[in-house]
Amino acid sequence: MNTATHVQDAIRDVVDLHRNRFELLRARPEPKLGYVSIHTPEEILLAAGAIPFRITGEQAYTNDAAARLSANYCSYVLSCLSEGMDGVHDFADGVVFVNGCDMRKRLCEAWACDVPGHSAYYLDLPGDATDLSKAYFASQLHKLIATLERRYDRKIVHDALGRAIETCNRSRALVQELDRHARSGRRVLSGGETIGVVKAATTGLKDAFNERAAALLGALNTADSLPQRRPHRVMICGSYFDHQGIIDTIEETGAEAICADISNGAKYFEGRVDPDAEPVAAIAAYYLDKHTSARRLDTDVRMRHMLELVRAYGVDSVIYYVLKFCDTNLHEYPYILQRLQAEKIPVLFIEGERNATNIAGTRTRIQTFLEPLIT
Amino acid sequence: MRTERREGERAAQYQNLLGLMGEPHGDRAAAPDALIKAIRMRSVMNCHRLAEAYRETSKVAYVSEQFPTEVVFAAGAMPWNIESMAIMLAQSVDVNRIFQLTQEKGLSRDICSFLRGPHGMMLANCYPTPDVVLTNDQPCEGLAKQMCLAGKRFDVPVIAMNTPESFDEDAIGYVARQIERMRERMAAELGLEGSSESLQRAVAFSNDAREYYRKTVALLETHKLPGISRELQEIFGMNYFGARENVTLCKALYQAAAELAKAAPGGGKRVIWIGQVPEETHELLRHMSREVEILYWAPLWNANLRSLDETRSLHSIAERAILYHWNAERMSVELERICDRFSVEGFVIVNVWGCRNIAGISPMLRDFAARRKIKHITINVDLVDRNNYAFNHVKNRVDAFLELMQ
């Protein structure tokens, strides 16, 4: 087997974890807890003996959910509710909702009414990272711990939290190591594969993920040569993004899709929880410090992070992708556009749907945007 | 950080505002004689505070809809509620020009027009340049975002607070400490020194006004008082609690309500208007008011009826702030109380284009109405941007609802 095939097999192994997640999760005896925001403290759920998995809202049919909430709602939120109403996560014990946006607050309420048999836990997410906010978030984590202790009849001790932190930090370190290739100008993963790897990390099957990601890194280390970056790099920013059709469109033009500034990208695996600090405080600090979504009150925090990513990946242009009706991202767009233009970074604004299939118009716009930039 | 305003900047902004407003397109709504004094007082107060905000020497604080204005008055600043000013825009004949400006700058039309409106007013240089922006995340994150971006636009300090949804001691303490920090920053960075005495005074004014407000609401429980609910809504929208003038205004309204109660005028069946509220001459209101008595939901919320604890004012303000949050469970309890006390027979759920909170909470409202056998209608409208709404599109449904109410 040549080394390129070996690498491809290793990538497939990792990505398959997400592809086969329901089957794999069903087979596990531990309780499973879903979540819809990457600011959910997975460490606490793991320490409670549960498996935290991200609900990725892959269901395209959302009519019932739209009838329940509104058709003028973010399609990611509708897809998640739709999956819940249809029993897609019937193996799960409950869902932890972090206040990632107003619509997710309403999703939590709708879930509690319309998804029987699931417990719905709610966590307020402050929009900044002051010491007051960290202390408040930590106080909520303590309450979540107490609730989970009652639910699963087990004490969540410091040791368990320490082990969970170690496991999650290991996952982060492995993906960061993979990501270092992209930052240093090598193209070991396509845009779709990058998202696939991050989604695999969010399935909650942490040990399996760590093992497979380590194997992938091993394969890369022994590879004869690794592909170099393409001449033009487009970074995708904005709402929840996981659209293979759009990535394909970008990559078919000869450009490279950098899926970093999204929750299925670097925003998920950045940083690490301080293993030496008091665990709950460290977890609270980690999730607030790394928070750079549009939900963060000060747009400049997000902006600084975005520009750091632009520099780190050598990005040439930006596609600002917003799920229709994603208000916070829509509000910030004029400001972000102005700031990116000041940095002479070309920007294309695209509004889309979580599971849109007819993207012909979007494809034309992307091609038109990239053609003069690449040639 | 910008330190000084240009000379005459606010005067020019005031002229821009007057030019934009031009002639309002609505007719004046008829008001009972007993109420005219209170309405005039409110109009004069609004004109005065508006003109004051454009004076170069005024300290203007942009605030969000349900911001604890007692803190602003205590610091000697003028609160400028950017969202409630949008309703003034709705009455302008030139509203399209404002929305056109927002679109030219890339702001999506899918955003609620109550937020696009203020954004456009800033682009048109019609709002007075603020000295500071103070915001919490109420009633929605969109407004909080718009506020923070306004601070960047004018290059002035933004002091933002998080208001949790959970109602417990940790959450209350968190909000109270944030208010404390906000006061410290206002003093340190802007010289807006709010002594504890001045806060106490603002809280006392707030409570005095609230006492009259509450007594007026109590009269509404037992009497049908035309125009009173609207005035309560206006006072809620102004959010001027903490100012001495507001005590006089609330007192005048209470006296008018007491006067009207003596005559015990009749009225149609009661419906509550749930959601954002249009300007008072809006065709929907005029059309519906011929058949039913409209009570506005928000002024009756528990958060609006509470007095502040003068010995623990920040704690008490924090409690109120959390209660203002949209929360299906708490709102359901509130509705139960409102329906019982005010003999409500119908719900008009007003789904304003772009308001995700009302859209997301509507199922609870409809379930509640069905359980209580209350007739209800959900209408999709836009109360500021007329490009998104036409009266004829909803009139049929409204008429059918009004027939049901007979």
Image: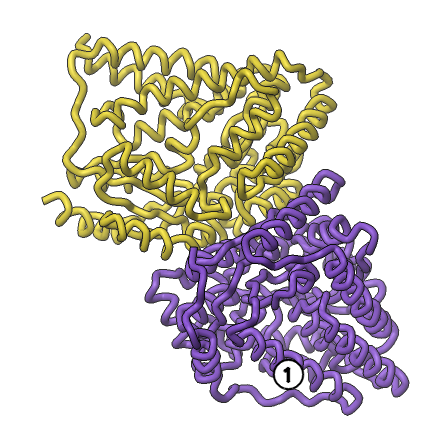
Chain colours: A yellow, B purple
The image shows residue A211 at horizontal and vertical percentages of 40, 11
The residue nearer to you, when weighing A78 against A157, is A157
Q: Is residue B47 left or right of residue A253?
A: right
The residue nearer to you, when weighing B50 against A313, is B50
What chain does badge 1 belong to?
B
Q: Is residue A156 left or right of residue B18?
A: right
The image shows residue A254 at horizontal and vertical percentages of 15, 37
The image shows residue B272 at horizontal and vertical percentages of 72, 69
Vertical order, A324 against A253 (above or below): below
Q: Quadrant of the C terminus of chain B?
A: bottom right
- Residue in the image at 25% along x and 11% along y: A221
- Secondary structure beneath dot 1 equals helix
Q: Is residue A50 visible?
A: no
Q: Quadrant of the N terminus of chain B?
A: bottom left
Q: Residue placed farthest to the right in the image?
A: B262
Kind of residue at disc 1: Arg
Vertical order, A60 against B357 (above or below): above
- Residue in the image at 78% along x and 79% along y: B253
Residue that badge 1 annotates: B286
